[in-house]
Amino acid sequence: MLASVLFLSAPARSQVATGYDALDIPPPSNWLARRAWLADRGVSVDFRYTSFYQGLASGTGETDYEYGGKSDLFINIDSSQLGLRKGGGFRSHFEYSHGDAPANLGGAIFGVNTALYWPADTPDELVATSLYFTQKVGDRTSIAVGKFNPVDLYAQHPFYGGWGSDRFMNVVLVAPPSGLIPVVFMGAVATVEIEPVTWIFVVSDPYDRTDDYLPGDLFSDGVLMAVNATRVATLAGRETTYGITGLYSTAEALDYSLIGGEIGRGTKSGAYNINIQFTHNLQESGDQSDAAWGFYLKAGIADGNPNYVERSIIFGIAGSPLFFGRPQDSFGIGAYYYDLSDALQDSLDPLANLKNESAIEAYYNWGVRSWLTLGLDVQYINPATGNYKKALVPSLRMQIQF
């Protein structure tokens, strides 16, 4: 009888809701429903984990193959859902890397595994590499202010970008080094669309801000300015783009011509980098507007002192392998040549032999499921480090998206 009284005294589930039901939130175990619930409220969450098995097949250095992993969490919030102005939002990217797979191999000065290299010097540590607010101003302009991971800015590019997890792995083919843009920067980015040209303006602090969140010394030692103009056109009936980018830094850096001198620590300011870009789709899908593969070219010149870059060229093909009838897969073949600062090379000689660096990289990603991708990547590198043999670096990777 007592049991019956207690049972009858308990409120029916339909009458009184508590916990997740009271808040109309799906339970934690139902992640897909919970994610959809957040999306309806202007919050998008994208989590992905990528594992790597990588080593040195030939070349100079340790030849053991090692495992490594990278977790990426992206959280975007629509500002209008918070009662703020429409057309704005908060963007964030949190990164965590672990394992023994090295980011550098074979004497290459550019990282062979961007996912494990980025963010720099922070293994086994959760770091927010992007934290910024973006706002549309009218129909053609948007402004973003905060902390930026440059790789994130390449996210939608079919050749570069991909964080070393989605497309190419070598940092040159993920986020081409200009010698000026730091690993993580703080500043403002403005995008202005004036058809058929899109303009991008960047003003930032010139130094790496990976571990900084609310620094009080921004712009105290100089400023980095950049401008890009890209024109979208059509060539042979397929999409083509032409672009030019200029970067200039007022920050003081080591004067390479004084290395080894009496003082050996002189500085110099006024570094620049100017590059041109060209892209052309060689094949496009009639069914999927974003499925295509094409040719990409980027060539640049720089001052060479205090910039460690003098000249560079990057080119290749990449995209969806429509010739296999698998638009969900992706592939790429890219190459680069970096002519490093003559002043730096001359100053180090004969104590150190610093050469120019070149490499070829190829990858193929097999979309097994919408949430599972398997990839194979091979790099052949002529490293800048003197007396190092040419390196062959094969890699396997697996990515799971939640």
Image: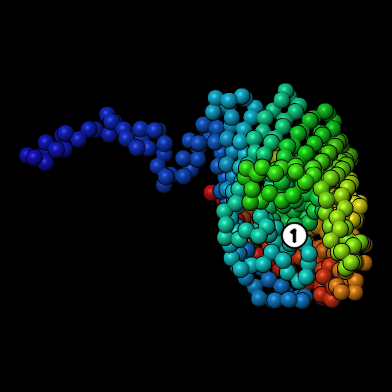
The single residue placed furthest to the front in the displayed view is 262
Q: Which image quadrant is residue 347 in?
A: bottom right
* Left or right placement of residue 77 versus residue 204 in this view: left
Q: Position of residue 245 (x, y in %)?
A: 86, 42
Residue assigned mark 1: 170
Q: Please count the marks in the image.
A: 1
Q: Residue at x 72, y 66 (%)?
A: 104
Q: Is residue 344 visible?
A: no
Residue 43 in the figure: left or right of residue 220: left
For the point 75% across and 53% down, the residue is 174
Q: What's the residue type where badge 1 is placed?
A: Asn
**Left or right placement of residue 274 versus residue 105 in this view:** right
**In terms of image quadrants, where is residue 117?**
bottom right
Which residue sits at x=60%, y=51%? 127
Q: Which quadrant of the rendered structure holds the N terminus?
A: top left
**Quick one: SS at disc 1?**
loop
Q: Is residue 356 above or below residue 223?
A: below
Few, some or many residues within 10 Å of mark 1 (<14, 14–19, 20+): many
> Along the line of sight, which residue is nearer the eye, 146 or 327?
146
The percent position of residue 250, horizontal first and vertical second, equals 84, 45
Towards the viewer: 101 or 378: 101
Image location of residue 243, percent across then percent down: 87, 41
Image x and y of residue 322, in percent: 74, 49
| Residue 176 appears in the rendering | yes
Query: Could you tell me which residue is drawn at 76 percent across and 65 percent down?
Result: 379
